[in-house]
Amino acid sequence: MMNDKNSQKIVDIIQNWARKHSIWVLAYGTGCGAIEIPPTMTSRYDAERLGVRGAATPRQADVLLITGYLTVKTMKRVIRVYEQMQDPKYVIGFGSCTINGGMYYDSYNTIKVLDKYLPVDVYINGCMPRPEAVLSGFAQLQKRIAEGRANGAQQYKDNLEWYRANQKKIIPNWIMPEYNW
Amino acid sequence: METVLMDILGAVVTFLVAFVVGMTYGGLSRKITARVQNRKGPPWYQNFIDAFKLGFKKSAIHHGVMHHLGGAFLMVSSVMTLMIVPVLSHNNWFPNLNFQGDLIFLLYIMTFGPLGMALGAGQTGNPNSAIGVTRGLSQMVGFEIPWVLALVALMIQYHTTSITGLMAAQAHSGTWLMFSSPFAFIAAVMAMLGMFRYSPFDIVGAPTELASGPVSENGGKYLFVMMSSGSVFTFAKLTLYVDLFMGGADNLLILLVKTFALYLIPMLYGMTTPRYRTEQAVRWFWGWPSFFGLLAILQAVIF
C-alpha cells in the first residue's frame, strides 16, 4: 500500500510536469528589455514550442517577467500586479538592472536589487540578454519547477513582513489594498 | 430504468468526446497557425496541458456570486447545445433530447451562455470586461441576422423545425443541404466566422487591446471551466453545421473529417485578415452574409 506522503509526491510530480510545460508569462515591460520579448515569441525563436505563451492579465499569468530597471514609481504597480497573481507563481528578473542596478547603479529613483522587494526565482543576466538567453532562463525555470524548487511565492508569504518593510522603505505614500491570501 | 441509465451514460460519453475533440481542435489550430507563421509551434496536446495546469491553480478571487456563476452559465449553455444536437445519425451511444422545434430552442440556448458570462463579467468591475461584453453582444447582433435568416430559410423550405427532420430530408433526397440550398449554407458559414471569434472577429477577447476582455478577471479554475466550455461548444456548433448542411455522419471518423474541414474555414480565414473594429464587424455581417440570407429565404419561398 502507498502511504499519503508517496501519493502526494506522485501528484506533485504530475502537477509540476504540467506547470513546467505550460508557462503563461505576464511581461511587465518596465525597461528596455521589453524589446527582446517579441523576437523570443515570434518565428525566429518561437517560445511557444516550449509551452511559453503570453498572458493578458495578472489573474491568468504564472510568471511575472520584470524586463529591466524598476523605478520607485513602477515598483508600486509591480507589487500590486504580483499580489494579484494566483498561486503557483514565479518571478523572472531580466537583465542586469534587476540584479544589481546595472547601468542605473547610481540612479536616485531606481531600485538596485529586485530580490529585496519580490522573491525572484530565476535571474537572466546581460544588458540586454538576447533571446537565446531568455529561452535558457525559461529552461532554467522549467528545471526548477520540475524539481519543486521554484517556491518564491511561498518565501514571500513566509517572510511577508520583511518584504513589506523593504517595500515601504522606498514607497513613502503606501496606499495599497491589503490582500489576505 | 435501464434505458434511463443508458441515456445518462451516453450523455457523459457525449460530453467526454466533445471535450477531447474540442480541445484537440484547439491545439491543432495553434499548431497550424504556428506552421503558417513558419514556427514549430506547440504540440497538438498543448491545450490539455494548459487546462490541466489551470485546473490545479489556486484561486483566491472573490468579486461576488455572479462572478462565480458566469463560467457555470457558459458551461450549462454549451452542454445544453451539445445534448440537443444529434452527434451521429444512427447510434444508441449518443442520445439527444430531440423534439419538434428544437432548432428554435437552439437559437435561444446558444445566446444564453454569453449573456450569463456578461452578467459574471459585469460584476468583476474590470473596465476591460465591460468593454469586451459590449463588443461581444454587438457582434452577436451582427452574426445572428444571417444565421437566423439561413435557419428560417431551411425551416420554410423543408416544413420542419427539428434537426432530425432536416437530416431525414437530406437522407430522403440524397443530396446535402449545402447543395440543395446553397445560399443558406453561404450565409451560415459567413455567420460561423463570427461565432468562432477567430481573427478578424476576435474583437471580444482582443489580446493586447482589451487584455482578453470578459475573462480578464478570471484565472485558474474559472479559466479552466471557460476553456472546457469553449471546447465543448466548438464541437457542438461544428456538429450542428454538419447535421444541418452536410447530411450528418454515420460514424465518428466521418464526423471528425467533416467537422475539421468546416473548422478550417474560420481558422484559415483568420490567418489572412487582421482584426476588425466593432462597427466594421457588424457592418460586415449586415452586408453580404445578410444578402445571402435573404436570397436563401427567396429561394425557399419561390422554389
Image: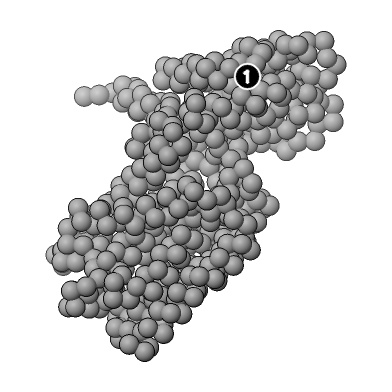
> What amino acid type is highlighted by mark number 1?
Phe
Q: Secondary structure at mark 1?
A: strand
Residue under the image location 30 percent in, 49 percent down: B21
Q: Position of residue A58 (x, y in %)?
A: 60, 37
Which quadrant does the C terminus of chain A fall into?
A: top right
Is residue B153 among what the camera can see?
Answer: yes
Q: State the residue position of label 1.
A: A94
Q: Does B43 appear above or below A164?
A: below
- B144 left or right, relative to A175: left
Name the residue: 46% across, 66% down.
Answer: B191
Name the residue located 83 percent from the left edge and 20 percent from the top edge: A109
Image coloring type: one colour
Left or right of A57 on screen, residue B98: left
- Residue closest to the eye, A97 or A9: A97
Toward the viewer: A144 or A97? A97
A157 displayed left or right of B14: right
Q: Quadrant of residue B49?
A: top left
Q: Residue A107 is drawn in which quadrant?
A: top right
